[in-house]
Amino acid sequence: MSNQYLGVKIPVPADWAKVAPTKIRKDLYSHYGISKTVVDRWIKETGVQPLGRHDRLQTVMKRPSTIKSVYRHVWQPNVSRAVDWSSAGKAADYLRRYFANVHRCDIQLHIGKSGTWGDKRGVANHGRGFWNVDGKGVLTAEQIVCLAHEKGFTV
């Protein structure tokens, strides 16, 4: 069987000069429902260039957004953002190089509630003065400093 359209060139559409400069090649393929080789031939025949990738990005960035901005609340623990300058705090910072999870036991579990990580696990004094080290368990401030000294920490 022979293909009756074999060797027949698809003619350049009438709106090519208007549409091509406003779209990138991939959009032209889907707009006209044709292959890459046909678009390349039309570009050579007419000299009309489609948008480049960089041009398309610039056009999209200049357009005003039609999407309403949605406020998404990202959960953040209720922990002071300040650096803990105590010797245990500095030691815990140092230990984060060696252990995946090092944190204070007095952090609040839920925003607006009074329960702490230490309360949930039965640590004395609501977890104040205690640290949790991954693989080691709950340690006091003195134990944190000693463990950090074993790993090479100096004050």
Image (cartoon, rainbow, N blue to C red):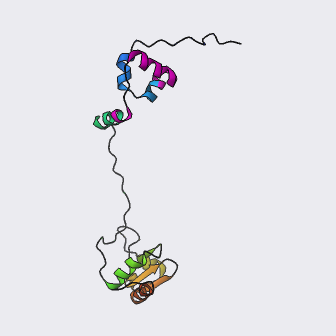
Q: Position of residue 135 (x, y in %)?
A: 52, 79
User: In the figure, is residue 86 to the left or right of 34?
Assistant: left
62 w.r.t. 99: above or below? above
The magenta stretch spans residue 49:
yes
- Location of the N terminus (image quadrant): top right
Residue 151 location, x and y as percent?
Answer: 45, 83
Query: Residue 71 versus residue 61: which sits nearer the camera?
Result: 61
- Residue at 51% in and 82% down: 136
In which quarter of the view is residue 80 placed? bottom left
| Residue 131, horizontal then vertical, whole percent | 42, 81
Q: Position of residue 142 (x, y in %)?
A: 40, 89
Q: Is residue 115 left or right of residue 37?
A: left
Q: In this picture, is 45 found above or below 64? A: above
Whether residue 64 is visible, yes or no, is no
**Residue displayed at 38% across by 22% down:** 20
Whether residue 153 can be seen here: yes
Residue 143 falls within the magenta-colored stretch: no
Q: Which residues are magenta?
A: 29-55
Q: Residue 127's image quarter?
A: bottom left
Prevalent SS, magenta region = helix
